[in-house]
Image (spheres, rainbow, N blue to C red):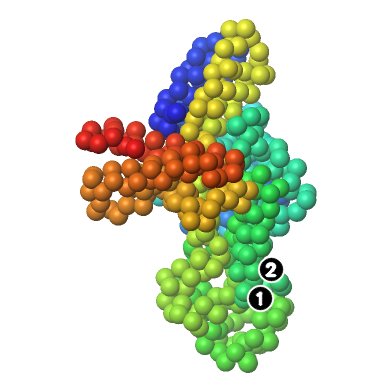
Amino acid sequence: MIDDEDLQERTHRLLAEAAHVYRGVPPAAAVLRATVEGLAGPLRLAVAGPAQSGKSTLVSALIGEQLAPVELPGEQPESVVYRDGTEPLAWWRDAEIPVARTAYGLRLSPDARHERRQPGASRAVIVWPSRVLRRTELIDTRLPLVRAVEEADAVLYVTPQLGDADVPALLTARGPRGPITAPVHLMVVLSRADATGGGRTDALLTAKQAARRRRREPRIGALCQDVLAVSPLIAAAARTLTADEFQAITALAALPRAESEPHLLSTDRFAAAGVLSPVDAPGRVRLLQRFGLGGVRLALTLARTGGDTPAALAERLQEHSGLKDLQSSIAGLFTARRSVLRARSALATLDHVLRTHRTPAAGHLLAQVELLVADAHELRELRLLSALRAGRLNLPPEHGADARQLLGGAGVSIGERLGMSPDATADDTWHAARAAAGRWRDLAHGGTLPAAQRRAAETVLRSCDMIANRLDRLSSPALPLG
């Protein structure tokens, strides 16, 4: 059994050996070289999906600044990569390009340098100082999902509603074959949550309930880690709420409901001249552009029920928009597993190279990739977490939460896996580790569980062994785990 550190080290060795084998095959050598260089970088998270699904707005919401979409006169890049840096910069066709902020995102301005360059990869790079981007590189992409997966370690598939037409696209994102195909790298975001049921104030709650039902469907659960309902429009407006917007919302919220509610039935009524006197018509149009009608309704309700400061209103809007749930899922399923997902995508790339450019000198590498994937316990953890979250596999109720925690579903550190408080002593930690191992050894070997649940219990027991191995590296306890 190997953990994340061993997985990354062995992946790096396989890539280096493959790069040596393929040094005389330029296409394969270039791919392998880029894969090796990126193995230690931040998580690459692509935001993909159909046109007009809210991808760019969601990117802005995740970063917390109005940076997307990127406008480039004459053509639109297939992908825009957002990276952390000390100062704002932009690159296009391998040359720096002037970048300016607009009211709706960023604008790139090509000059003669770019006109003289041959068209290259249709990809722009934005460097922007951001805490969010320090650990996660965001990719706003127009590429089909099957290609977006190739340039990312994890993917948010953004779609207005998850229908039959989305299933073939999700199938293409599973990966090459075998254990690597488990959908541990993919999450579905339903992006029209605020429009559910005609955009009522409870639309977002209804959408979240629907997302939970879709997540439990075996067919959907087999294609992704999670399904979440989010309103990118409301989320982005909440993250970038201005003082003028807050004042307009509170002024409208202060009106008697009998006076304001008839004008909240449609955008035409809300934007009409000569009504809702505290905010003029252009100001109300700007609110519609930023929040949508459903978001305006929600903001007024929240302003009346405790959102009486800009910070409080923004916080509640983020929570209701579904953004906080999405951020939590990204943190737990993707960011915390960065090294595992990076290794997974690197192994998928290596698998593809080995099968596309066959050579006797690389024959043994394919078998080593298969053995490494089969032996990588953290990939097993992710597959089991995915099955438990989606409801494809259920453990006895009294053990389900314990399993998810030990598997790293609430955090991958030793303390988080064991549910320890920050002030726990080393003895407390070892006692909890021994107790967890004992519980899951009894379940795995007791013969009381059906076969599928027993295999799941064996995976959890291996996680307990991994915890013990990590504790061994920190100290030498007087008593063995068991």
Cβ atoms under marks 1 and 2 closer than 8 Å: yes
Q: In front here: 359 or 366?
A: 366
Q: Nearer the viewer, residue 114 or 346?
A: 346
Give the percent coordinates (x, y) of residue 345.
Answer: 55, 32
Q: Which residue is drawn at 28% across and 43% down?
A: 430
Q: Where is residue 161 in the image (x, y as percent from the top left)?
A: 71, 57
Q: In this view, does 304 lie to the left or right of 189?
A: left
Residue at the disc numbered 1: 200
Quadrant of the rendered structure where residue 266 is?
Answer: bottom right
Q: Considering only vertical position in the picture, is 14 above or below 403?
A: above
Q: What residue type is labelled 1?
A: Arg
Q: How crowded is mark 1: few (under 14 residues within 10 Å), some or many (20 or more)?
A: some
Secondary element type, mark 2 = helix
- Say which residue appears at 48% left-offset and 49% top-offset: 404
In the rendered image, the quadrant that contains the C terminus is: top left
- The residue positioned 54% from the left and 22% from the top of the image is 371
Q: Residue furthest front?
A: 447
* Viewer-proximal residue among 125 and 397: 397
Instruction: List the residue tagged with mark 2.
Output: 196
Query: Amino acid under label 2?
Result: Thr
> Mark 2 packing: few (<14 Cα in 10 Å), some, or many (20+)?
some
Q: Please, what secondary structure does the residue beneath circle 1 have?
A: loop
Q: How far apart are marks 1 and 2 (CA)?
A: 7 Å
Extreme residue toward the top, this view: 360
Q: Is residue 241 visible?
A: yes
Residue 185 image position (x, y, % from top left):
57, 41
Q: Which quadrant would the N terminus be assigned to in this image?
A: top left
